[in-house]
Image (cartoon, rainbow, N blue to C red):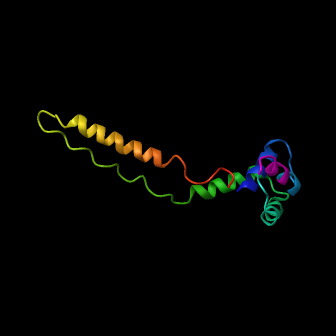
Amino acid sequence: MKHLAAYLLLSLGGNTSPSAKDVKTVLESVGIEADDERLNVLISELKGKDLQTLISEGSSKLASVPSGGGGGGGGGAAAPAAGGADAPAAAKEEEKKEEAKEESDEDMGFGLFD
């Protein structure tokens, strides 16, 4: 993926046919070591092809892939009994649960170019 990202960056920058050396230079400029085997496969697969055409073809293929459903939403909370004294406590408890979820998603263990 990092090789493809560098290739696309070079293409956007005006290089219509980036070489393996060009891609390596981009990756090394941000401290990433290129995998020569993967890079050579990428270059050979993309050689002589129009990137815009490949992207539009790929997008149409992805559009036909089922990606799960938008299943129903969760059930609503029960209404408090007359008086509703427990409502603030329940709201605080929900806030704590949501904060815990958000904190656990902060670091997913990988970087953009790993």
Task: Tell me, yes or no, whether the highlighted magenta stretch contains residue 29.
Answer: yes
| Residue 51 rendering spot, x and y as whole percentages | 77, 52
Q: Quadrant of the C terminus?
A: bottom right
Task: Tell me, yes or no, whether the highlighted magenta stretch contains residue 22.
Answer: no
Magenta stretch secondary structure, dominant: helix
Could you tell whether 104 is left or right of 95 in the image? right
Q: Quadrant of the N terminus?
A: bottom right
- The quadrant in which residue 24 appears is bottom right
Could you tell whether 25 is left or right of 61 in the image? right
| Residue 9 rendering spot, x and y as whole percentages | 77, 46
Is residue 29 or residue 23 the one in the foreground? Answer: 29
Give the residue displayed 20% in from the left and 44% down from the top: 78
| Residue 16 rendering spot, x and y as whole percentages | 86, 48
State which region is magenta.
24-31
| Residue 83 rendering spot, x and y as whole percentages | 12, 33
Could you tell whether 98 is left or right of 10 in the image? left
Is residue 67 or residue 39 the one in the foreground? Answer: 39
Give the residue displayed 24% in from the left and 37% down from the top: 89
**Total of numbered circles in the picture?**
0
Could you tell whether 102 is left or right of 107 in the image? left
Height in image: 8 above or below 41?
A: above
Is residue 94 or residue 64 the one in the foreground? Answer: 94
